[in-house]
Amino acid sequence: MPPAPASTRVDRWAWAVRLFRTRALAAAACRAGHVKVNGERAKPATTVRPGDEVRVRGEGLERVVDVRLAVEKRVGAALVPACLVDRTPPPPPREALAAVRDRGAGRPTKRERREIDRLRGR
C-alpha cells in the first residue's frame, strides 16, 4: 500500500474506499447533502483525517464509517478494511418491513400504498 497523506478530500476518499462507484458520484452526493463528516454536512473538498466519522446516505440506508487511513488512490476490495471501520447498524429484518395484507383483500387503497412505501423507505 502506498504511503498515505495526513488528510484528503472526502469525495476522493469515499471513492477510494469504494463507497461510490465514481468520484463524480461521490462529489454529487456531497453537493446534495448526502455525506456528513463528524456530523456536519460536507462539501466535496472537505478534508478527512484518521479518526473522523463519515456518514453516507443513499438508497434507503445510511452507512456510518470511521476513517482509519486517508487514501487518495482507489484501493482493492481486500484493502478497504485497513482504511475504514464500518459501524453501519444492521438493517431491520425483512419480516418487519413486510406489509401484512389479507390474501384476496383486493387492490390496496391509496392510504395503504403510502404505508407500504413508508415501510419500504421510499
Image (spheres, rainbow, N blue to C red):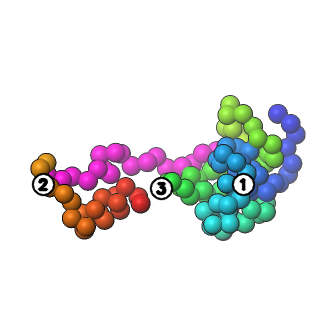
Q: How far from the left and from the top, in percent, is residue 115?
A: 29, 63
Asked whether the beta carbons under mark 2 and mark 3 sit within 8 Å of each other, the answer is no
Count of numbered marks:
3
Measuring 62% from the left and 50% from the top, which residue is drawn there?
Answer: 65
Amino acid at pointer 3:
Gly
The x, y position of residue 10, in whole percent, is 74, 57
- State if disc 2 and disc 1 touch (CB < 8 Å): no
User: Residue beneath label 3, please?
Assistant: 60
Q: Please identify the residue farthest to the top as the structure is shown.
A: 78
Judging by the rendered image, the residue that carries numbered circle 2 is: 105
Earlier sequence position, callout 2 versus callout 3: 3
Q: Position of residue 24 (x, y in %)?
A: 72, 54
Which mark is on residue 24? Answer: 1
Neighbour tally class for label 3: few under 14, some 14-19, many 20 plus, Cα within 10 Å: few
Q: Residues within 10 Å of mark 2 (few under 14, many from 20)?
A: few
Is 92 positioned to the left or the right of 102 in the image?
Answer: right
Image quadrant in which the N terminus is located: top right
Q: Image quarter for residue 45?
A: bottom right
> Closer to the camera, 45 or 83?
45
Magenta segment's dominant SS is: loop
Provide the residue span drawn in magenta. 84-102
Sequence-wise first label, 3 or 1 = 1
At a point 70% along the width and 43% down the height, the residue shown is 17
Q: Which residue is at a point 54% across and 49% down the rendered structure image?
A: 88
Q: Of tags 2 and 3, which is closer to the observer?
A: 2
The residue tagged with tag 1: helix, strand or loop?
helix
Figure check: 79 above or below 111: above
- Structural crowding at the residue carrying mark 1, measured as other residues with C-alpha within 10 Å and reported as few (<14), some (14–19) or many (≥20): some
Q: Does residue 35 appear left or right of residue 13 in this picture?
A: left
Instruction: Check disc 2 and give the amino acid type.
Output: Ala
Pinpoint residue 15: horizontal percent, then vertical percent: 71, 48
